[in-house]
């Protein structure tokens, strides 16, 4: 169940429990919040999309 008080809920993200567990584990290792880690990942992904859209889409497939 998505916690509607979380910043992720405001974005409308629907993440499965396995991905949330992975995010939480990595966030703990890096000393970041889940939201900060999601923002970082989105910024990096957007940077790759801007630099080379075809390669980024191939990587995501």
Image (spheres, grey):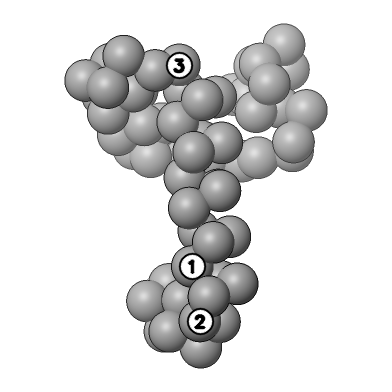
| Residue depicted at 45% across the width and 16% down the height | 33
Horizontal arrangement in the rendering, residue 4 relative to residue 30 (left or right): right
Horizontal arrangement in the rendering, residue 18 relative to residue 12 (left or right): left
Mark 1 and 2 residues: CB-CB less than 8 Å, in contact?
yes
Rounded to the nearest angstrom, the CA distance separating label 1 from label 2 is 6 Å
Q: Residue furthest front?
A: 51
Q: Position of residue 14 (x, y in %)?
A: 61, 41
Rounded to the nearest angstrom, the CA distance separating label 3 from label 2 is 29 Å
Q: Nearer the viewer, mark 3 or mark 1?
A: 1
Residue 57 visible in the displayed image: no
Q: Which mark is residue 2?
A: none
| Residue depicted at 73% across the width and 17% down the height | 4
Graded by Cα atoms within 10 Å as few (under 14), some (14 to 19) or many (20 or more), the crowding at tag 2 reads few
Q: Position of residue 24 (x, y in %)?
A: 34, 23
Picture layout, residue 5 above or below residue 44: above
Q: Position of residue 61 (x, y in %)?
A: 42, 78
Horizontal arrangement in the rendering, residue 39 relative to residue 56 (left or right): right
| Residue depicted at 31% across the width and 14% down the height | 31
Identify the element where label 1 is drawn.
helix
| Residue depicted at 68% across the width and 21% down the height | 7
Using the image as rendered, state which of residue 45 and residue 7 is in the foreground: 45
Horizontal arrangement in the rendering, residue 55 relative to residue 53 (left or right): left
Identify the element where label 2 is drawn.
loop
Q: Which mark is residue 33?
A: 3
Provide the residue designation for mark 1.
48
């Amino acid at each position: 169940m998505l916690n509607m008080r979380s910043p992720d809920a405001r974005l409308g993200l629907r993440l499965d429990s396995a991905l949330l567990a992975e995010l939480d584990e990595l966030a703990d290792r890096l000393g970041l919040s889940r939201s900060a880690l999601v923002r970082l990942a989105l910024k990096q992904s957007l940077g790759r999309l801007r630099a080379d859209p075809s390669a980024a889409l191939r990587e995501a497939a």
